[in-house]
Image: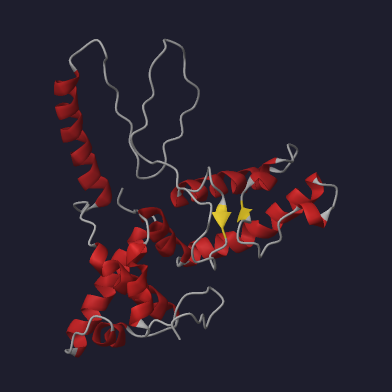
Amino acid sequence: MANSYPNEWHVPDWRDRPTYEGLASLTDTLWRWQFLRRHAEYRQDWKIHAQGTYERELSCYGGNVERVLPLDHPDFKADIVYLAVNHTRALEEVINFNEACERLDRYGLRGCGMPAPWIDRPSKIFFDETDGAVLEGTGDKIGPLRVSLGQAMYMFDLKKPIAQQIKKAAKKLIGIQRFRMRKKVDQRLHRELWPDYLRILDARAEGITFSKMGQTILRVKDYDAAASRAKKAHDIAAHLAFNFPS
């Protein structure tokens, strides 16, 4: 049972606790992938872009299927380049391309591409950095900057002491964070809970009620308390797909 995958997404049976506990040794990158590949939005986007990616690759190699990775190959990754190759495309397609860019940014996979969500441990996967970027002024006009939802930019003056500017920036950014996120951002990892979070995501995908998940996975006896605890854990788990702590 531990190695069986009773569904198209190749996730374990949510009742099989030992299999999930066996994920404890995963790297942060693979943990992030486990949460992302379970998200319905990501699964749908992969299906949308995989065929287009394959057809573009096939056309690049003159239709030679032997030179193109098939859709079920573990190293195949979907991307959105195929949406941009036709420069005479209609406005609606331009909008779709921009929306697809935003989705890839949200997934953190603009540079890597999208692995198939049924692959448990992709051999070649990396996530884009969402913080720590430094943009240094040169005196020239910088073209349109793209700041994704959930990010902010702050201007520092290199001619002035940095320490005081950092304190000022921290105060402003924390205020913006609390206003935009509507809550305090908790960066505690709680890694010991992640296996149960995955179980809850997989159980919910099967249509299991929160009360049953709370009693079975979280071992809460009271019916109402079990449902409440499981719902909260599910929301946290879904949040980790797009807001994985770094």
Q: How is the image coloured?
A: secondary structure
**Residue plotted at (14% across, 22% down):** 164
**Residue plotted at (18% across, 40% down):** 175
Residue 102 is at least partly visible in this image: yes
Q: Is residue 221 above or below residue 80?
A: below
**Residue plotted at (38% across, 77% down):** 19
Give the quarter of the figure containing the N terminus: bottom left
Query: Left or right: where does residue 9 sit relative to residue 229?
Result: right
**Residue plotted at (84% across, 53% down):** 64
Tell me residue 128's x, y (percent).
45, 43
Total marks in image: 0
Tell me residue 20's x, y (percent).
36, 74
Query: Left or right: where does residue 134 sit relative to residue 160?
Result: right
Kindly indicate the quadrant of the structure image that contains residue 51.
bottom right
Q: Is residue 211 above or below residue 85?
A: below
Q: Nearer the viewer, residue 87 or 243?
A: 243
Tell me residue 239's x, y (percent).
34, 60
Query: Left or right: where does residue 236 sit relative to residue 2?
Result: left
Kindly indicate the quadrant of the structure image that contains residue 156.
top left
Q: Is residue 22 above or below residue 245?
A: below
